[in-house]
Amino acid sequence: MKLPRRNFLHLAAGAAALSALSRIAWAQAYPTRPVRLLEGFGAGSAPDIVARLIGQALLERFGQSFVIENRAGASSNIAAEAVVRAAPDGYTLLLITTANAVNATMFKLNFNFIRDIAPVASISRVPFVMEVHPSVPANTVAEFIAYAKANPGKINMASAGTGNTTHVCGELFKMMASVDLFHVPYRGAQVFPALLAGEAQVYFGPLLSSIGYVRAGNLRALAVTTTTRSPVLPDIPALSETLPGYEASGWQGIAAPKNTPAEIIKTLNTQVNASLADANFQARLANLGATVLPGSPADFAKLIADETMKWGKVILAANIKAE
């Protein structure tokens, strides 16, 4: 039996409206089971700690568990690919960091990070610390630049691995300050023993792991790498005070597989931002040297795109190759 065209259009419109209403109802009911939040650096790492903080906050808001899964390896690319390949239903999420923006250029990935993820919400930002061994005759960034220019190629710049965020922060400094520092990559935790022994003279280290050595006088902080000073080290200048335009920071946020329903992304973003506004959550982040980074999914998408472009230019200009 053929339906009159008008009846058919009415039925089609009704079906579309019903579908839209069911999606909204589904999003309003979300989540109805535990949500997996993957992070790529391993238990006890700064991303793992942030993931657990936001996971607990979301549990309290949704009344549903956010289970943190550690998928360490390949500079967090294993975790990223697992989420990219997951069903876009809001039940598998990724704790993303600055490293993901670096990796987009650094590695030949089996996916396109910007194309294949849906930004949900940014969480936090933390500076790195430009720190030197006490034997370095410099108490300011300007003095260090002068010292480096007088000793081209003779100052060892440590990193926690080739292509690591600590490496690209240093390469950006080299480019902007026009200095020649010799890069020495170490394996993660081996960096600080090398610095303390004087094998390396300068390091752009994460604030959380550096602050103990700075406060004890084992290493000298010359600057923080964010555009403003850190509340944790208020007497230490921002590097941009000497090198205008310099900015490098570690940031974290949540992403989902592409095609995740917009209603679910909006629901998650709203609750993440509500968590960031909580004074207790802010205090917990402050213990990590971090500050909250609220915003919309579009804001976070812009940050990811801008950071991917910025670090891509540094990697190509410095000719950094994955080991």
Image: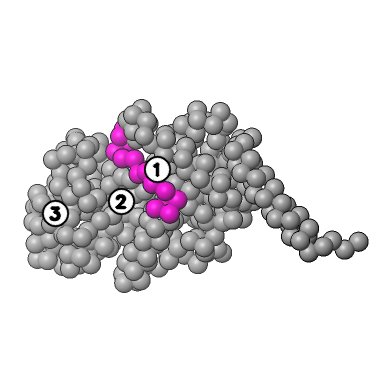
What segment carries the magenta color? 286-300
Mark 3 is surrounded, within 10 Å at the Cα level, by few (under 14), some (14 to 19) or many (20 or more) other residues, namely some
Q: Quick check: marks 3 and 1 in contact, CB under 8 Å? A: no
Residue 299 part of the magenta segment: yes
Of the pair 33 and 161, the residue shown nearer to us: 33
Place of residue 22 in the rendered image (x, y in percent of width and height, measured from the top left): 67, 44
Task: Identify which residue is drawn at 39% across, 53% down.
Answer: 299
**In this figure, which residue is indicated by the disc labeled 1?**
123
**Label whose residue precedes the other's in the sequence (3 or 1):** 1
Place of residue 138 in the rendered image (x, y in percent of width and height, measured from the top left): 9, 52
On residue 264, which mark appears?
A: none
Place of residue 228 in the rendered image (x, y in percent of width and height, measured from the top left): 20, 47
Task: Identify which residue is drawn at 35% across, 71% down.
Answer: 316
**Dividing the image into 4 quarters, which one contains the C terminus?**
bottom left
- SS class, disc 2: strand
**In this figure, which residue is indicated by the disc labeled 3?**
241
Place of residue 59 in the rendered image (x, y in percent of width and height, measured from the top left): 52, 30
**Relative vertical location of residue 43 with respect to residue 160 in this rendering, above or below:** above
Rounded to the nearest angstrom, the CA distance separating label 1 from label 2 is 13 Å
Nearer to us: label 3 or label 1? 1
Q: Is residue 254 left or right of residue 90?
A: left
**Label whose residue precedes the other's in the sequence (2 or 3):** 3
- SS class, disc 1: strand
User: Is residue 195 visible to the viewer in this orientation of the structure?
Assistant: no
**Dividing the image into 4 quarters, which one contains the N terminus?**
bottom right
Q: Quick check: marks 2 and 3 in contact, CB under 8 Å? A: no
